Structure formats: C-alpha cells, structure tokens
C-alpha cells in the first residue's frame, strides 16, 4: 500500500471542503461557526496630466480589511464563551458597569475626574470584545494541512432573528481586521516546504522529517 505522505497522487491538487476546517479565536476553538468571509480593498486613483486622456500613473492609498462571520445559534449567544473570558475598560455611564466580575464588585482602574470612573469588566455586547486573532486550519483525509490567519479582528455589527419557517437559527457578525495571512500548506509542522512546487523528480529523502515511501 502506498504511503499517503509521499504518494504522487496525494501530493498533487490538494483540495479541502468546509467540513475539513476548524476555527480558533485566539486560543479558543469555535465550534458554532458556520462560515467566515473577508475582503481586502485599497484606494487607488489615476493620475492625469494635460495632453493625455489616459492616466500617467496610479497613486496607492489606504487599505481596508473587513468581512463577516455566521454562527449557528444553540441555547446561548454565539460568542458567549469569548465574551465571558474577555475584559474591557468601561465607564460608569454604561450599564455594563453594574455587572460583577468573578463575583466581585467592579473595581475602578482609572479615575479621569471626580465624576467619571473607568472600570474593568466583562462585555455584554460583541462589539465590546477586545481585538482577537482568527486562525483557520484545514486537514483532509489524506493528511494534507493548510492554515490562514486574520489578525486583529474587531466586531462591528451583530444581527440575528428567528422565524417559524426557520429550521436553523443563525447569528451574523461583521468585523474589521488589521492583517490577513493567506492560505498556505503545512508540511511536518512548518510552512516553508510545499511539495507540489518541488516537482515530480524531487528526492524526498532530502526534506527534513519526510521518509520516502513506495509510490503506487
């Protein structure tokens, strides 16, 4: 039987489906997430000069990263665990201040003036959750692995609804982020080796961690 790690058939045209992918928010595995998307946009404007209808060049401006997340709604808020483990600094004019942290009254962490006190407390809205990193990891049946990351994600909007016609209830969020690292393959715990790019005549014994097997 061929070694799945080195078979010439499993080393080409790697594919994954949504059921192969696991999502982590920081170190918390998220089992309720149903889908996630992102988009990257950048301002680019043409530069014109007299005597030409065509642009001479393009100036490059700001970049924006944003996307959406969809969660299955079970018996609690989709980000219930994340919110209960998060802390943020709120002010006394927010209702959040009336909540207790670990059974203790909210303690002041900074005093702006005699009437405004900031306190460390847990969020009640998803947009109060501090920035977090999203890591997506995919592993298929033949042992191929890939990963990507969305860095510094912050929740913007939250929405949900129920209906007698819905057999599944969902929660949707939109977010912004600071950085995206695209999908890349993982070989033996590292992302520096891509077997597909090495060609068919590669000597697998020269790759650390790989043992050449019998091709079918």
Image: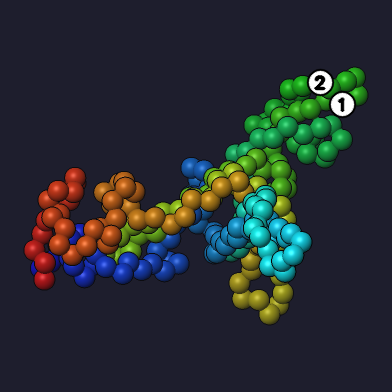
Q: Nearer the viewer, residue 115 or 198?
A: 198
User: Residue at position x 76%, y 61% from top?
Assistant: 50
Outermost bottom residue: 165
Image coordinates of residue 211 in percent, x first then y, are 13, 52
Q: Relative to residue 98, is residue 131 drawn left or right?
A: left
Q: Can I make out residue 151 in this image?
A: yes
Residue 197, disc = none
Left or right placement of residue 152 versus residue 211 in this view: right
Give the structural element (helix, strand or loop) at label 2.
strand
Q: Quadrant of the C terminus?
A: bottom left
Q: Residue 62 appears at what percent x and percent y?
A: 67, 49
Alpha carbon of mark 1 to alpha carbon of mark 2: how far?
7 Å
Rendering quarter of residue 33: bottom right
Determine the residue located farthest toward the right in the rendered image: 115
Residue that badge 1 annotates: 116
Residue closer to the observer: 147 or 28: 147
Say few, some or many: other residues with alpha carbon within 10 Å of mark 2 (under 14 / 14 to 19 / 20 or more).
Answer: few
- Which residue is depicted at the point 64% across and 31% down? 102
Q: Which residue is mark 2?
A: 111
Asked if labels 2 and 1 touch by Cβ distance under 8 angstroms, the answer is: yes
Quarter of the image where the N terminus is located? bottom left
Mark 1: secondary structure: loop
Residue 140 on image: x %, y %: 33, 64
The residue carrying pointer 1 sits among few (fewer than 14), some (14 to 19) or many (20 or more) residues within 10 Å by Cα, namely few
- Residue ID at (72%, 69%): 53
Horizontal arrangement in the rendering, residue 215 relative to residue 60 (left or right):
left
Where residue 97 sits, quadrant-wise, is top right
> As displayed, is residue 154 above or below residue 2?
above
Q: Nearer the viewer, residue 173 or 87?
A: 173
- Sequence-wise, which precedes: disc 1 or disc 2? 2
């Amino acid at each position: 039987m061929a070694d799945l790690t080195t078979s010439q058939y499993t080393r080409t045209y790697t594919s994954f489906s949504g059921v192969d992918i696991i999502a982590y928010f920081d170190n918390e595995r998220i089992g309720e997430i149903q889908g996630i998307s992102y988009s990257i946009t950048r301002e680019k404007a043409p530069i014109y000069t007299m005597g030409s209808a065509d642009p001479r060049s393009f100036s490059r401006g700001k970049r924006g990263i944003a996307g959406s997340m969809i969660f299955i709604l079970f018996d609690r808020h989709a980000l219930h665990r994340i919110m209960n483990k998060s802390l943020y600094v709120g002010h006394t004019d927010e209702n959040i201040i009336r909540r207790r942290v670990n059974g203790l009254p909210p303690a002041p962490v900074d005093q702006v003036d005699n009437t405004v006190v900031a306190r460390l407390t847990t969020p009640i809205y998803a947009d109060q959750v501090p920035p977090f990193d999203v890591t997506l990891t995919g592993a298929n049946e033949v042992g191929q692995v890939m990963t990507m990351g969305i860095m510094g994600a912050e929740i913007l909007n939250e929405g949900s609804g129920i209906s007698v016609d819905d057999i599944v209830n969902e929660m949707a969020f939109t977010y912004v982020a600071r950085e995206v690292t695209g999908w890349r393959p993982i070989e033996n715990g590292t992302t520096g080796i891509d077997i597909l790019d090495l060609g068919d005549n590669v000597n697998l014994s020269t790759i650390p961690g790989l043992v050449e097997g019998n091709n079918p």
